[in-house]
Amino acid sequence: MARHHVTATVNGDAVEFLCETHQTLLEVLRDELRLTGTKEGCGTGDCGACTVTLDGRMVCSCLVLGVEAEGKAIQTIEGMAVGRDLHPLQQKFLEHAALQCGICTPGILVAARSLLERNPDPTASEVRYWLAGNLCRCTGYHKIVEAVLDAARELRGN
């Protein structure tokens, strides 16, 4: 099969990769670019574990083809921390014990960051609504919502 040359920006860095027409963005991120933070949960877009942003829009990377990333900006979980400094969301997830097995955590963190970029002062209901596409089998969501609200407060300077 023919491989396609794709140029994109991933976490602020210009990247180039070759991919098959049928390869998903998830496969490209993990297999071609070796960014393994994005997880595959279901492969059908139902669980949110593979959530990334594509030109600022949340997508399930298992449903987007790698060739569709041409010229686009992709943000993954690897782009949240700056060096050893965790993003406030990551820090609050640790402080609130808002993670357990970790399969859903990268997708939830990417989605939560997307929410706080759009709405820096969400209610608990708004956080739950925004994260509804991300399924967690371990935590029960309460600690996740509390961590997001706490991170929002910190990011606002409260």
Image: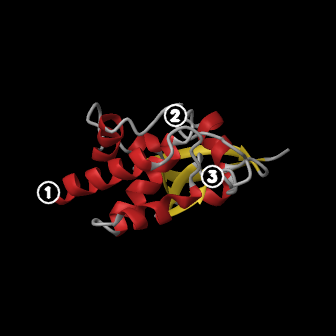
Residue sitting nearer the eye, 28 or 39: 39
Pick whichever of labels 2 and 1 is earlier in the sequence.
Answer: 2
For the rendered model, the colour scheme is: secondary structure
Q: For the residue marked with disc 2, what is the amino acid?
A: Gly
**What's the mark number on residue 61?**
3
Taking the spot 38% from the left edge, 55% from the top edge, the residue there is 113
Mark 2 surroundings: few (<14), some (14-19) or many (≥20) residues within 10 A: some
Left or right placement of residue 126 versus residue 54 in this view = left
Mark number for residue 102?
2
Q: Nearer the viewer, residue 25 or 145?
A: 145
Q: Work out whether residue 69 or residue 102 is closer to the camera in this orientation and state it.
A: 102
Task: Give the image quarter of residue 38.
Answer: top right
Is the residue 28 above or below the residue 8 in the image? above
Label 2 sits on a secondary structure element that is loop
Point out the tag, 3 or 2, that comes first from the N-terminus.
3
Q: Earlier in the sequence, mark 3 or mark 1?
A: 3
Q: Which residue is mark 1?
A: 157
- Which quarter shows the N terminus? top right
Q: Tell me the quarter of the picture where residue 3 sits.
A: top right
Residue 117, image quadrant: bottom left
Q: Amino acid at mark 1?
A: Gly
Image vertical order of residue 130 relative to residue 12, above or below:
below
Q: Secondary structure at mark 1?
A: loop
Query: Mark 1 Cα within 10 Å, few/some/many (few <14, many 20+)?
Result: few
- Quarter placement of the C terminus: bottom left
In what element is the residue under mark 3? loop
Find residue 116 and report its horizontal and vertical position in percent.
34, 61
Determine contact: label 3, label 2, CB under 8 Å: no
Give how far across and how far down residue 105 sits, in percent.
49, 41
At 59% from the left and 49% from the top, the residue drawn is 135
Tell me the amino acid under the disc marked 3. Ser
Residue in view at x 73 percent, y 47 percent: 43
